[in-house]
Image (tube, helix red, strand yellow):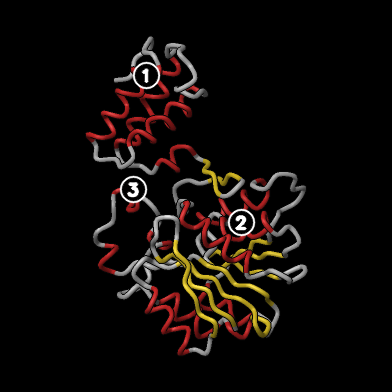
Amino acid sequence: MVTAGLSPRQALAQVQARLEEAGCPDADFDARELFRLAAGRDPRLSGQPLSPEEAARLEQVTVRRAGREPLQYICGRWPFLNFELAVGPGVLCPRADTEVVAEAAVEQLEGVENPRVLDLCAGTGCLGLGVKALRPDAAVTCLEKSPEALRYLRENARCALPGQREPAVQVVEGDLFTYWQSLPAGGLDLIVSNPPYLTAEDMAHLQPETAREPAMALAAGADGLDFYRALALHYRAALRPGGALVLEIGWQQRQAVTDLLAAAGWTGIQCRQDYGGNDRCILARA
């Protein structure tokens, strides 16, 4: 148990050991983040012993993380690109790999003035807000179905980007499988999405942390392609000719998603890798 009077180094060592014993990946990183959260200071830059209040907070968050609650949920906020997002139970945790998708999406808007952008299955809004952060002239709509996720999406639309006096993006409650019916033809320059893409087999073998995230944001049918089928078949008409589609994919889904898009008439299909060298997003043109 974390007790008052421990030095930051001693507290870190104790927390890291407990997280390692619980099977947490990256236990050293997590221990530092939990210390910052509990004590409000960097353990590597401070030698001040833990106060009773700091020790109690650190013990509390250590117990939660050792129980394999996602670190993002414990912190309540998480960095993405150059801003922070509110995050918690009921919404998918923003991940560094998805930053590659946001950056690739913005590249597709080169030369387009005041682009019109749609983020489908928006969750925290990381992709839509990422586009807005990098292209302030963009008009971005974020679509989300889950009432729990919508709470975070609305908060992030209001507060995530510095200097915003009103929501940075438009938030719409809706379902990807039917929303296309309300879109005018040729009205968008870019559609971006990180849809659910786990297979039934994947869902049966989730890491403990991922199992705490909402199944609605993860599961995509037996083969993990349900959302990509709908995107391929129904959303091309909503883009102007030459408009772009940028999709996050699972690391084994490049060929399957490419084939779905090609069969539906999309062109210029490419794949980008994340910083770990895994296939991470598919780009296509209407």
Which of the numbered marks, if any, corresponds to residue 9? 1
Q: Is residue 182 left or right of residue 225?
A: right
Q: Quadrant of residue 225?
A: bottom left
Q: Compute the Cα span from label 3 to label 1.
A: 26 Å
Residue type at numbered disc 1: Arg
Q: Residue at x 45, y 13 (%)?
A: 47
Identify the secondary structure beneath mark 1.
helix
Identify the residue position indicated by label 2 in the image.
Answer: 130
- Sequence-first tag of 2 and 3: 2
Within the image, what quadrant is residue 15 found in? top left
Tell which circle, 2 or 1, labels the residue nearer the N-terminal end. 1
Total marks drawn? 3
Residue 58 in the image: state x and y as whole percent.
40, 24
Q: Alpha carbon of mark 2 to alpha carbon of mark 1: how far?
A: 36 Å
Is disc 3 placed on a helix, strand or loop? helix
In front of the other: 147 or 283: 283
Residue position marked by numbered label 3 in the rendering = 209
Residue 38 horizontal/vertical position (percent): 46, 25
Question: Of discs 2 and 3, which sits in the foreground?
Answer: 2
Q: Quadrant of the C terminus?
A: bottom right
User: Which numbered disc covers residue 168?
Assistant: none
Disc 1: CA contacts within 10 A as few (<14), some (14-19) or many (>=20): some
Cα separation, mark 2 vs mark 3, equals 24 Å
Asked if 255 appears above or below 62 in the picture, the reply is below
Residue type for callout 2:
Gly
The amino acid at mark 3 is Glu
> Which of the two marks, 3 or 1, is nearer to us in this view?
1
Per the image, label 2 sits on a secondary structure element best described as helix
